């Protein structure tokens, strides 16, 4: 069984640390595909680098899918906030489900993010679960393992950063089984978040999230 790991990046100074740690922690046969939107291409070691042609994290994942060979697709960030040691837990959970979401908010899960980001996350995930009728504690997670069969049955039309939310919602409507797995979400060590909460980028992302929620709910996306 092959595991394909897609990591979208844009100016992530520690991406090679992420790659190295995945190789150390994950013993299953795997490949790592980095889809990068930086102005200057990073020097990537021990992974396949794809220069992103579109824009945004969601579209990066969509582009990366076409290069994958795995039976299972893992989606994770390249900023060291998602722990490589949690990948195997997600994969194991697929023995009884089709999608395994890394959850910060179920028993055993934890987030070490800064306080104001915790508050924003808590509010948006509750609203998202309500609007989309998703029985999930961490509907805004960006860390997930997905069986390839799921992608054969859904059509992705990403908007912004929350592609796992789109995948989960569309897959559930098709009858796929979704489970949550506790993870520990770490603080960023270096570099800047692409969305600053109290800024124009933060406001724009909140608007995009609400647009995504209502367009998914109304079958417009």
Image (cartoon, helix red, strand yellow):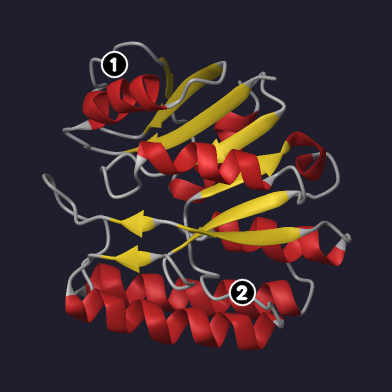
Disc 1: CA contacts within 10 A as few (<14), some (14-19) or many (>=20): few
- Can residue 41 be seen here? yes
Mark sitting on residue 44: 1
Disc 2: CA contacts within 10 A as few (<14), some (14-19) or many (>=20): many
Q: Quadrant of the C terminus?
A: bottom right
Looking at the image, the residue that sits furthest to the left is 190
Classify residue 13 by image quadrant: top left
Classify residue 176 by image quadrant: bottom right
Mark sitting on residue 11: none
The front one of 151 and 198 is 151
Q: Position of residue 59 (x, y in %)?
A: 53, 44
Can you identify the residue that label 2 sits on? 136
Q: Position of residue 220 (x, y in %)?
A: 75, 70
The front one of 119 and 210 is 119
Q: Is residue 108 left or right of residue 148?
A: left
Q: Is residue 188 left or right of residue 177?
A: left
Measuring 27% from the left and 63% from the top, which residue is drawn there?
Answer: 195
Measuring 23% from the left and 15% from the top, which residue is drawn there?
Answer: 43
Q: Quadrant of the N terminus?
A: top right
Measuring 37% from the left and 77% from the top, which residue is drawn there?
Answer: 121
Q: Position of residue 219 (x, y in %)?
A: 79, 72
Looking at the image, the residue that sits furthest to the top is 46
Q: Position of residue 104 (x, y in %)?
A: 41, 66
Measuring 65% from the left and 81% from the top, which residue is drawn there?
Answer: 214
In the image, residue 168 sits, relative to residue 77, either above or below, namely below
């Amino acid at each position: 069984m092959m595991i394909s790991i897609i990591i979208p990046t844009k100016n992530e100074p520690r991406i090679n640390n992420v790659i190295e740690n995945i190789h150390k922690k994950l013993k299953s046969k795997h490949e790592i595909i980095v889809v990068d939107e930086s102005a200057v291409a990073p020097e990537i070691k021990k992974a396949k680098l794809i220069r992103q042609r579109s824009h945004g994290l969601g579209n990066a994942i969509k582009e990366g899918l076409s290069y994958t060979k795995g039976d299972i697709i893992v989606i994770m960030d390249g900023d060291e906030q998602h722990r490589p040691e949690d990948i195997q837990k997600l994969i194991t959970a697929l023995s009884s489900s089709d999608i395994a979401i890394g959850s910060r908010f179920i028993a055993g899960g934890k987030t070490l993010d800064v306080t104001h980001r915790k508050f924003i996350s808590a509010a948006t995930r509750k609203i998202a679960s309500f609007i989309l009728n998703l029985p999930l504690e961490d509907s805004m997670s960006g860390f997930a393992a997905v069986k390839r069969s799921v992608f054969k049955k859904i059509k992705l039309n990403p908007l912004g950063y929350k592609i796992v939310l789109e995948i989960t919602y569309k897959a559930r409507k098709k009858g796929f089984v979704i489970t949550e797995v506790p993870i520990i979400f770490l603080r960023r060590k270096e570099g800047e978040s692409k969305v600053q909460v109290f800024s124009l980028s933060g406001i724009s992302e909140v608007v995009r999230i609400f647009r995504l929620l209502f367009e998914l709910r109304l079958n417009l996306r």
